[in-house]
Amino acid sequence: MIATDLQNGVERLGELIAQSSAIVPFTGAGISTESGIPDFRSPGGLWTRNRPIPFDEFVADQDARDEAWRRRFAMEETFAAAKPTRGHRALAALYKAGKVPGLITQNIDNLHQASGINPADVVELHGNTTYARCIGCGTRYELAWVKQRFDASGQAPSCLRCEQPVKTATISFGQAMPEDEMQRAAELSERCDLFLAIGSSLVVWPAAGFPLLAKRSGAKLVIINNEPTEQDEHADLVIRHDIGETLGPFVGN
Ligand SMILES: [Zn+2]
């Protein structure tokens, strides 16, 4: 059912949360826009103005790597200034209350960890842009190290151990989904009794399959998004309102 208004939605959501012991939130870009992080996929978003650099181009071409890092550094002020929103804080409150065994996110902004959720309990389907890794051996590098090398040489740096390219720890277009994270997300979806899809239009597969997997496994499904989604018809509750306003009442739980 679709909540008739915000108050009705918040009340119904409160009842479902009270009845549940294993809640799995699944978050998309919409939860972070309140913090100033743009939705890359939205009309007018970064990806409609700057064609994303596919993984194979990044691997093959130094110019592509240089461009990818220039774009990332240009975004650093935005990412560095972003703080967890009311939505992030509400989910962290449920987590601290012992109701959330783990959280699945399509976001790369590290804001769930910043809100107080143990990094080990955040399943990042698209990786994390707040640090970098060598694409060969997986060694972690901090962005400050990459920036220093880039500024000194004018080129994106390679790994000190194996000389393969160093890339933000995100999943790029054309890059395989991370197997371990996909497996953990599936397990969380199968074992929860309430699945909260928040701020995602649920069109990007395979990630969009998790709400349906949870529903098929017996969980209640709630969708909170400003716009209609592809899966509203399967949901037990749909709240088409601002995420901050919808989850704000749960921050103090
Ligand atoms: Zn390496």
Image (tube, rainbow, N blue to C red):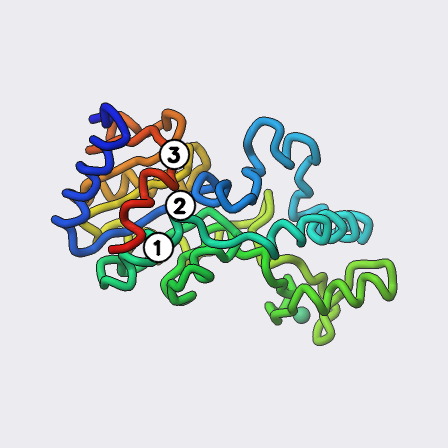
Q: Quadrant of residue 145?
A: bottom right
Q: Is mark 3 within 8 Å of ligand 1?
A: no
Report the residue at 57% width, 40% height from top.
Answer: 38
Q: Nearer the viewer, residue 239 or 26?
A: 239
Estimate how packed mark 3 is, as few (under 14), some (14 to 19) or many (20 or more) residues with alpha carbons within 10 Å: some
Q: Mark 1: few, some, or many residues within 10 Å (few <14, many ≥20)?
A: many
Q: Does residue 56 appear left or right of residue 107 in this picture? A: right
Label drawn at residue 203: none
Is residue 184 shown left or right of residue 172? left
Discs 1, 3 touching: Cβ within 8 Å: no
The CA distance from mark 1 to mark 3 is: 20 Å
The answer to whether residue 35 of the structure is visible from this angle is: yes
Q: Earlier in the sequence, mark 1 or mark 3?
A: 1
Question: Whole-percent x and y of residue 120?
Answer: 39, 67
* Image position, residue 185 (x, y; %): 35, 53
Query: Which x, y percent locates residue 212?
Result: 28, 38
Tag 1, which secondary structure?
strand
Q: Which mark is residue 242?
A: 3
- Tell me whether circle 2 and circle 1 mark residues in contact (CB < 8 Å): yes
Q: Can I make out residue 59 in this image?
A: no
